[in-house]
Amino acid sequence: MPLPSILESCKLDLLATDEELQQKYPLAMAERITRIRDMYNYWLANPSMKDRQLRDAIMSRYDVSQSTAYSDISVIHQLVPLLSQKSRDFHRSRANEMMLETYAMAKARKDTRTMAMTAANYAKYNRVDVEDEMTMPYEDIVPQPFCPTLDVTVLGIKPIPDVYNHISRLTKEFSRDFADIEDVEAEDIDLEEDKLFAPLTDDTDRPEI
């Protein structure tokens, strides 16, 4: 059975232990998964790092070629959208961290003005003044067991005895009041489709508009 690609292997086992990796993959592949995991964690600690800096770090730490380093970086980019797209959640977390650091520094200096401004920005950014939306408890909703029926009593209506004869009697009664209304049978319309939709042989056969 062929081994999965390094990308698929990382998706499945990036957080597996070294022992688990060595039991599941060849040694070289297990070591590469470990290397990619380590460099991903290294990037998390240094999120402003450029790809060339990450490349140099991989080459110096693991003594691999430049092409191998870039190959690892490509896998990291595909594994973690934070690396290439800098997702909104990541930026939100970083912004909160910066505001908390600013607040701590202002507090140490007893700079109440900066403390108040940072606290206000933090509250506004995280929308702490907005009430949490109530979510519908969909798991508690029980579907109604509707079943088709001809029994009108389920609607609280008293049934009409011998309803079909009752309908027939009313039909005759109302027909006498409107004698000019006649029931007619439906008739098929002859559209002469064989002539209307016949294939055209030349321009002379085209119908005049």
Image (spheres, grey):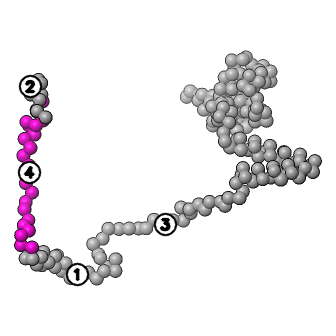
Q: Decide whether the magenta segment is chiefly helix, strand or loop.
A: loop
Marks 2 and 3: in contact by CB < 8 Å? no
- Residue 18 position within the rendered picture, expressed as x and y whole percent measured from the top left: 74, 34
- Nearest to the observer: residue 64 or residue 106: 106
> Gap in Å between the C-alphas at discs 3 and 4?
50 Å
Depth check, front residue: 190 or 66: 190
Circles 2 and 4 in contact, beta carbons < 8 Å: no
Above or below: residue 159 compared with residue 45? below
- On the image, the x and y values in percent for residue 122 come to 76, 50
Mark toward the start of the polypeptide (3 vs 4): 3
Residue at horizontal 78 percent and vertical 53 percent from the top: 120
Identified by mark 3, the residue type is Val
Question: Disc 2 designates what residue?
Answer: 204
State the CA–CA distance, disc 4 to disc 1: 38 Å
Q: Secondary structure at mark 1?
A: loop
The Cα–Cα distance between marks 2 and 4, rounded to whole angstroms, is: 31 Å
Tell me, yes or no, if residue 172 can be seen here.
no
Q: CA distance from mark 1 to mark 3?
A: 34 Å
The residue pinned by badge 4 equals 188
Magenta part of the protein: which range? Answer: 178-199
- Name the N-terminal-most of marks 2 and 4: 4
Residue at (21, 82) in percent of width and height: 161
- In the drawing, what numbered circle is on residue 160? 1
Amino acid type, callout 2? Thr
